[in-house]
């Protein structure tokens, strides 16, 4: 849209000015003009441009537009002695209509002021496809696109929603109004639906309209708050109950049809209401073809309500042991009871139906327990080998011991089931893959085609040993999708094999998307046949994109072809942007905006400077945040709203990396807001900026009227500061009172914020609503949470646990209440609250079943990890007896292995080493032990290491003696430079890798932007002299972590020009200790880089220069100007037609 709008404005101006003499024509008689067009002209005179547009649309829907009509309208205006020239009329209308975008409340007021016919037309425009075009003879206005644009603007959308509720049901029939509401609401992300909305909903809808509106609310169920769900349920049941005057509790208002109408809202029925449903009605409901689909979606049903529904179904004519009935139960099957009457065949049917239970919100521990019980029944009187293929995803519950006991034939027979199951642990995949391939000496195309999700367990060496023709057959088939789930070391094993072929260079273009980003820069240099079309399907590293864009730009006259391949935008350098003419730049900007998430902060800064130079009046305002802060300060109040809308659509923390500069941006935001968010419309305008408002603003600057909408926005904030969290907590306590007063709905709505509360407050929540607290915790797996929150979750699980103290006198475990599998699953990250002694007393079977889950807990302390390691030794014997699947399953527990224990492991497989390398907290001694043990067990010397070995060794390469690095084969090293460049090694090791890189890429003075980007942290091994010799134009192409890894005494050798050229991203990565080494002039240069100051040759950017704005105040390109024109274009083009 950004690139099209300047052309639209130019077109309009040409049309207006070329027909400017039309106003001088002799006026025709007023009788010549249709009454509706007379009315439209009067509204133009009065300045009621929205009304005029609606009258024009109505006229055009039933009349053919001819050229003379334009003359008559202008003649009419002339006869009224209106002192309008075409340009002045254009300017007035543009300004007036543009305000709807920035002041959507005005749109609401003006729609309230329309007459019934005009309002009817407005609703029809929103509703009907036949209003998709306004055809004024040879000019066609696409109202459909304009309508779609309007529905994507939160403010405009909100006004349309409110006015539809207020007036539509009085003007249009109810079915049409429900359709309009559906269109508006589906573009609202559910934030418009607050609990008080039911006060405005009609209570007397006829049946079809009610069903349709209920369907809209069902579609938006997951986007609405628990309070709103409850309010909408009450509104729906209020209408559904109307025909019944129930005084006798024996008669239920709930019929089969009403259950179908309620849809997902059926989970809000009370236990008593469910138990009162008549057997005939529940039987009818289960008989419906769509009942299963509905029951498949009741994700938030509780065990109590599910059991009630099952009880009523059992009381109807349905046999709960009938396979057909089981197929109809949807998610109710996850709570199936009465297992004592089941046979093995029925248990297998239930297990297959329970595939869907992973969609439930919570209660997964109970689901796992039910699956385990069904598994026992399904395998009764049969061996696991015999039943393996009929156990569905319950096979995920099999322990490593059970999987190891399987025969290779059994795995082969069951592969069509095993290869589709989701939820496997990494160690389970390793065992099953080995079982499947036990009978094959070499991996073949056929075996790969059968493995599905189990392919991730195949050893890297097996991929490397494949025939390269078979490998190409896999990559050229749909099976290449399965390859995308492989680990980096496996990817490199595949690539190594491909690159060894004689025709490897010509085959590079065929490497599929997931693997292509692993292709080395060196191999790209050799690959012919690259073009924009081929690259459209690839994913690129930035270094690849830099090289390929530079390569293709020389042979392509149309840069839009390169940019349309999406990933190539990563390779556009500032010099390319600088070299574009104004026309070309504005035409191409759309490509940059469409792929904004792929751009680096430096690229965005270059785009901002270019836009400022060529078209500052139409510059997207969010770009100002990337320019020096004085540009931001110069934004006048008249431009504030569009600045906020533009910036609010972006993520500020990725746009402006420096925290001090981000604070300046937020200060400008507060200034623009005048210190307050007064209403929900302002929340719409602010957008993502909500996440960056300071604590004091959250506490006092958001009005009560705006708070509910703001809270909806704050739910998606991922990195609030402790001060912001405290402010949110303060507001929530102010709104809802202490947790003692909270309802279940309140607690559900506040779930994303529960971690902000104190231990005492959370203790109350844990006591009142343990399930909600546990469900909240289960969604936060893998994140570090406050101890108070974890202890509250721990307390809630332990209080509901049925475990009794153990009687095992060994290791002092007598009388200790040990964790059960249920507890561990429910606790998730709160497992970090177990005492080390308790973890050591865990049952062996519990440890075996849950070791991977425990290994993923981020909060375990050193003593807890030590206890779990000791438990592993108790269960599996000494580390010398452990197999690959044991090591792979440990996760963080492996960090507790000391150097001698690490040396006992069998590390002959690079995949085992790679699994250890996923942990980042190894001591240098541990890393050295892992490296040495791999070299010994694999029989490799440093000179024998393949490229995939280097990738698999990962962080342990940092333990290498710098004197050994030259021994690495250059051909293997150059294939994985980019991977090695992600390591944060010591300076001597990085210096060793840098010397090795010189063998591949030449001396540092010969390096290009793509080479420097490829090297990553290896570039931090440069000497002082080498760093000083680098061209300043290369400075932005250091990777940020390379800058951070440079020692302070080396970093200070950079010249002021080099430092000023670092770019905003690299400058933001300069550490405090590096700053301390800099001179005042270097610090000034660094500040210029942080601030986004201009460093390119084509414009000098003196710090003292003050930005100036052009007089024009037209809408900025890149903002929803089209939405402003959606009202004005028809009238302006009408005038131009004369």
Image (spheres, rainbow, N blue to C red):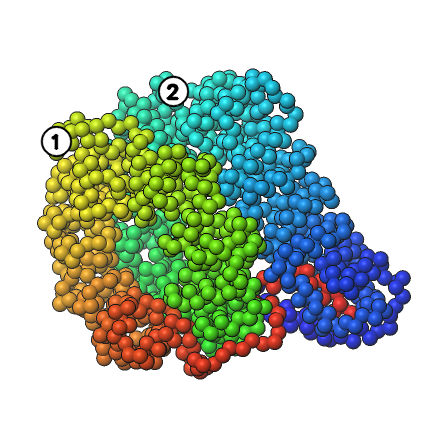
Locate residue 1015, reporting x and y percent: 28, 68
309 horizontally vs 927: left or right: right
- Give the labeled residue for mark 1: 810
Q: Would you call the spot at circle 1 few (<14 residues within 10 Å), some (14-19), or many (20 or more)?
A: few
Callout in the foreground (1, 2):
1
Which secondary structure lies at badge 1?
A: helix
Residue at image coords 17%, 41%: 867
Please identify the residue farthest to the left as the structure is shown: 900
* Quadrant position of residue 874: top left
Residue 533 versus residue 842: which sits nearer the camera? 842
* Quadrant position of residue 198: top right
Residue at image coords 82%, 57%: 36
Locate residue 537, reporting x and y percent: 43, 58
Q: Would you call the spot at circle 2 few (<14 residues within 10 Å), some (14-19), or many (20 or more)?
A: few
Residue 458 versus residue 833: which sits nearer the camera? 833
Locate residue 56, reporting x and y percent: 76, 58
Res 701 seen here: yes
The image quadrant where one finds the C terminus is bottom right
48 horizontally vs 1090: left or right: right
Disc number placed over residue 536 in the picture, else none: none
Q: How many marks?
A: 2
Which secondary structure lies at badge 2?
A: loop
Vertical order, 253 against 179 (above or below)? above
Residue 293 versus residue 1094: which sits nearer the camera? 1094
Vertical order, 634 against 685 (above or below)? below
- The reply to whether discs 1 and 2 touch (Cβ–Cβ < 8 Å) is no
- Give the labeled residue for mark 2: 338
Spatial CA distance of label 1 from label 2 is: 38 Å
Residue at image coords 78%, 65%: 45
The disc, 1 or 2, on the residue closer to the chain's N-terminal end is 2
């Amino acid at each position: 849209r950004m690139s099209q709008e300047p052309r639209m404005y130019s077109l309009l101006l040409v049309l207006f000015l070329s027909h400017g003499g039309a106003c001088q024509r002799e006026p025709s008689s007023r009788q010549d003009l249709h009454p509706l067009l007379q009315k439209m002209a009067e509204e133009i005179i009065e300045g009621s441009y929205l009304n005029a547009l609606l009258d024009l649309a109505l006229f055009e829907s039933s009349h053919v537009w001819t050229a003379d009509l334009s003359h008559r309208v202008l003649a009419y205006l002339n006869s009224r002695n209106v002192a309008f020239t075409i340009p002045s009329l254009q300017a007035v209308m543009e300004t007036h209509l543009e305000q709807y975008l920035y002041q959507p409340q005005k749109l609401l007021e003006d729609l309230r002021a329309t007459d019934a016919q005009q309002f009817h037309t407005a609703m029809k425009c929103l509703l009907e496809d036949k209003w998709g075009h306004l055809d004024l003879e040879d000019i066609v206005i696409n109202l459909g696109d304009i309508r779609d644009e309007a529905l994507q603007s939160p403010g405009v959308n909100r006004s349309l929603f409110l006015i539809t509720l207020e007036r539509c049901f009085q003007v249009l029939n109810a079915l049409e109004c429900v359709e309009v509401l559906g269109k508006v609401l589906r573009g609202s992300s559910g934030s418009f639906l607050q609990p008080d909305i039911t006060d405005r909903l009609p209570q007397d809808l006829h049946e079809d309209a009610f069903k349709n509106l209920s369907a809209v609310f069902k579609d938006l169920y997951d986007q609405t708050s628990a309070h709103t769900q409850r309010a909408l349920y009450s509104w729906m049941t209020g209408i559904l109950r109307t025909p019944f005057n129930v005084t006798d509790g024996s008669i239920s208002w709930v019929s089969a049809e009403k259950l179908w109408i309620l849809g997902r809202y059926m989970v809000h029925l009370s236990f008593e209401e469910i138990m009162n449903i008549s057997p005939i009605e529940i039987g009818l409901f289960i008989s419906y073809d769509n009942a299963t689909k509905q029951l498949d979606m009741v994700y938030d049903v509780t065990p109590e309500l599910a059991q009630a529904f099952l009880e009523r179904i059992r009381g109807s004519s349905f046999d709960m042991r009938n396979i057909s009935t089981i197929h109809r139960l949807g998610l109710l099957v996850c709570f199936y009871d009465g297992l004592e009457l089941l046979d093995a065949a029925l248990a297998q049917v239930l297990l297959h139906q329970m595939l869907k239970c992973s969609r439930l919100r919570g209660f997964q521990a109970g689901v796992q327990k039910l699956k385990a019980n069904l598994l026992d029944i399904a395998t009764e009187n049969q061996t696991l080998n015999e039943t393996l293929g009929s156990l569905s995803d319950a096979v995920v519950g099999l322990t490593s011991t059970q999987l190891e006991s399987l025969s290779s034939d059994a795995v082969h027979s069951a592969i069509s089931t095993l290869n589709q199951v989701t939820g496997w642990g990494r160690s389970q995949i390793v065992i099953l893959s080995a079982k499947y391939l036990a009978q094959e000496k070499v991996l073949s195309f056929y075996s790969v085609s059968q493995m599905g999700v189990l392919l991730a367990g195949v050893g890297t060496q097996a991929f490397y040993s494949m025939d390269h023709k078979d490998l190409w057959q896999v990559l050229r088939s749909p099976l290449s999708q399965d390859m995308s789930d492989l680990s980096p070391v496996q990817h490199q094993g595949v690539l190594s094999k491909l690159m060894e072929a004689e025709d490897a260079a010509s085959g590079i273009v065929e490497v599929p998307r997931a693997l292509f980003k692993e292709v080395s820069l060196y191999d790209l240099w050799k690959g012919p046949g690259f073009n924009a079309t081929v690259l459209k399907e690839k994913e690129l590293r930035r270094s690849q994109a830099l090289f390929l864009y530079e390569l293709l730009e020389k042979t392509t006259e149309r840069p839009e072809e390169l940019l349309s391949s999406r990933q190539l935008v990563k390779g556009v350098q500032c010099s390319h942007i600088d070299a574009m003419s104004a026309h070309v730049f504005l035409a191409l900007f759309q490509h940059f905006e469409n792929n904004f998430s792929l751009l680096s902060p430096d690229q965005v800064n270059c785009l901002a400077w270019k836009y400022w130079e060529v078209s500052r009046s139409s510059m997207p305002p969010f770009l100002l945040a990337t320019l020096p802060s004085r540009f931001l300060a110069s934004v006048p109040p008249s431009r504030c709203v569009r600045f906020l809308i533009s910036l609010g659509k972006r993520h500020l923390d990725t746009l402006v990396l420096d925290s001090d500069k981000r604070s300046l941006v937020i200060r400008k935001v507060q200034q623009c807001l005048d210190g307050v968010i007064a209403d929900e419309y302002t929340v719409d305008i602010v957008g993502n900026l909500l996440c960056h408002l300071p604590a004091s603003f959250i506490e006092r600057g958001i009005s009560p009227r705006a708070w509910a909408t703001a809270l909806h926005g704050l739910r998606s904030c991922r990195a609030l500061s402790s001060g912001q969290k405290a402010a949110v907590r303060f507001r929530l306590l102010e709104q809802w009172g202490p947790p003692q007063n909270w309802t279940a709905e309140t607690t559900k709505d506040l779930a994303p914020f529960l971690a902000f509360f104190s231990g005492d407050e959370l203790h109350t929540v844990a006591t009142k609503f343990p399930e909600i607290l546990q469900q909240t915790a289960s969604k936060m797996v893998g994140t570090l949470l406050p101890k108070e929150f974890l202890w509250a979750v721990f307390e809630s699980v332990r209080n509901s646990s049925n475990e009794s103290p153990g009687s095992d006198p060994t290791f002092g475990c007598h009388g200790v209440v040990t964790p059960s599998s249920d507890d561990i699953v429910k606790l998730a990250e709160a497992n970090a609250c177990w005492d080390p002694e308790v973890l050591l007393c865990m049952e062996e079977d519990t440890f075996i079943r849950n070791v991977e889950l425990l290994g993923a807990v981020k909060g375990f302390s050193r003593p807890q990890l030590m206890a779990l390691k000791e438990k592993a030794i108790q269960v599996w014997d000494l580390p010398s007896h452990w197999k690959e699947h044991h090591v792979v399953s440990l996760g963080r527990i492996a960090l507790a292995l000391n150097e001698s224990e690490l040396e006992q492991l069998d590390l002959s497989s690079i995949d085992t080493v790679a699994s250890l390398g996923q942990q980042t907290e190894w001591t240098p001694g541990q890393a050295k032990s892992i490296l040495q043990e791999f070299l010994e067990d694999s029989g490799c010397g440093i000179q024998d290491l393949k490229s995939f070995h280097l990738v698999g060794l990962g962080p342990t390469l940092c333990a290498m003696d710098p004197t050994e690095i030259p021994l690495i084969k250059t051909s293997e090293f150059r294939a994985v430079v980019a991977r090695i460049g992600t390591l944060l090694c010591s300076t001597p090791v990085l210096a060793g890798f840098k010397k090795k890189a010189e063998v591949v890429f030449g001396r540092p003075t010969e390096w290009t932007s793509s080479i420097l980007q490829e090297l990553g942290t290896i570039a931090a091994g440069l000497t002082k002299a080498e760093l000083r010799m680098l061209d300043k134009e290369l400075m932005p192409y250091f990777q940020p972590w390379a800058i951070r890894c440079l020692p302070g005494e080396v970093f200070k050798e950079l010249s002021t020009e080099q430092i000023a050229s670092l770019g905003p991203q690299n400058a933001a990565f300069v550490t405090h200790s590096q700053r301390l080494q800099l001179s005042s002039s270097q610090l000034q240069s660094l500040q210029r880089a942080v601030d986004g100051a201009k460093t390119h040759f084509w414009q000098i950017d003196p710090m003292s220069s003050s930005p100036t704005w052009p007089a024009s105040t037209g809408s900025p390109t890149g903002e929803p100007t089209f939405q402003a024109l959606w009202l004005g274009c028809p009238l302006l083009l009408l005038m131009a037609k004369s």
